[in-house]
């Protein structure tokens, strides 16, 4: 191999030694030696991966490096992906690549992922997942509100409070006995309603039937 391209990312093409087989594989690698990546493909072929006849029984095929990008260039990996996608879209044979096209950069990858997730959320299973996530979020919000209310209710019942605290509590007796208790019950019932709906959607979240109620 030409040592001048050792420290380069490489876009390559694999084809069959059989001229009647027009299947093509386009790939890219950052390996210093291209033969390293080629051996990995041959190993995958021996382990049962279907290359549509590109590799013969001896694990051999035609290979050619189509493009290179120096690893010293800024954002060389993104440039390598661009070149790989260019050759994927311009080859004339039957491309067997499963993962195609590759992405230009992380932003494009994220955008593609967002589209996949959005499409999934439009399916019945995806809608259920969104509903479960929403219920979990609401349950957590309710719990955050219940914690200080519960602490206030316990404070009113605390027989060990000092005299100054007791005076303050008695001055706000209506809050502790009515407002605090009523608010606590309203939030608790709303929270438990969400818990029961979540349990109906995903009983595995409560393996012992111990749905979160108080």
Image (cartoon, rainbow, N blue to C red):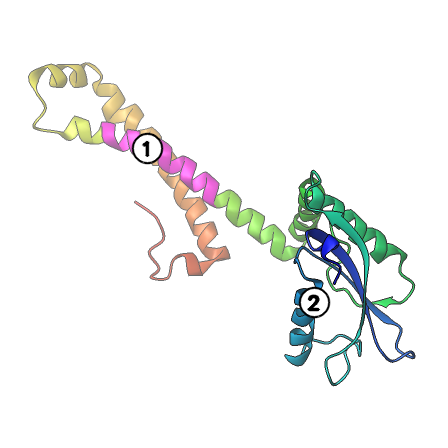
Judged left or right of residue 28, residue 167 is left
Find numbered disc 2 in the image and state the secondary structure of the residue it sits on: helix
Q: Is the magenta stretch mostly helix, strand or loop?
A: helix
Q: Specify whether residue 104 is in view.
A: no
Q: Residue at point 72% right, 57% down?
A: 3
Q: Which residue is nearer to you in this view: 144 or 82?
A: 82
* Residue 209 in picture, x, y percent from top left: 35, 59
**Magenta part of the chain:** 136-152
Q: Does the magenta stretch include residue 119?
A: no
The answer for how far apart the CA atoms under marks 1 and 2 are is 69 Å
* Image quadrant where one finds the N terminus: bottom right
Q: Specify whether residue 160 is in view.
A: yes
Q: Hey, which quadrant is residue 165 in on the image? A: top left
Q: Residue at point 18% right, 19% down?
A: 169
Disc on res. 193: none
Q: How crowded is mark 2: few (under 14 residues within 10 Å), some or many (20 or more)?
A: few
Disc on res. 35: 2
Q: Mark 1 points at which residue?
A: 184
Find numbered disc 1 in the image and state the secondary structure of the residue it sits on: helix
Q: Residue at point 18% right, 27% down?
A: 155
* Residue 32 in picture, x, y percent from top left: 66, 57
* Residue 66 in picture, x, y percent from top left: 83, 57
* Image quadrant where one finds the C terminus: top left
The outermost residue toward the bottom is: 57
């Amino acid at each position: 191999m030409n040592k001048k391209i050792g420290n380069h990312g490489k876009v390559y093409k694999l084809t069959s030694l059989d001229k009647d087989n027009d299947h093509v594989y386009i790939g890219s690698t950052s390996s210093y030696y291209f033969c390293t990546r080629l051996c990995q493909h041959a190993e995958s072929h021996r382990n049962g991966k279907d290359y549509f006849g590109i590799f013969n029984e001896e694990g051999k095929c035609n290979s050619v490096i189509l493009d290179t990008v120096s690893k010293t260039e800024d954002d060389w990996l993104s440039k390598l992906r661009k070149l790989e996608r260019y050759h994927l879209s311009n080859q004339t044979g039957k491309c067997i690549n499963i993962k195609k096209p590759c992405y230009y950069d992380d932003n494009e990858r994220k955008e593609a992922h967002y589209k996949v997730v959005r499409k999934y959320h439009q399916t019945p299973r995806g809608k259920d997942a969104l509903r479960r996530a929403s219920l979990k979020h609401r349950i957590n919000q309710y719990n955050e509100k219940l914690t200080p209310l519960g602490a206030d209710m316990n404070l009113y019942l605390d027989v060990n409070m000092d005299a100054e605290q007791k005076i303050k509590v008695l001055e706000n007796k209506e809050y502790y006995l009515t407002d605090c208790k009523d608010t606590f019950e309203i939030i608790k019932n709303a929270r438990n309603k969400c818990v029961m709906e979540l349990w109906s959607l995903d009983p595995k979240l409560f393996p012992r039937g111990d749905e979160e109620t108080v």
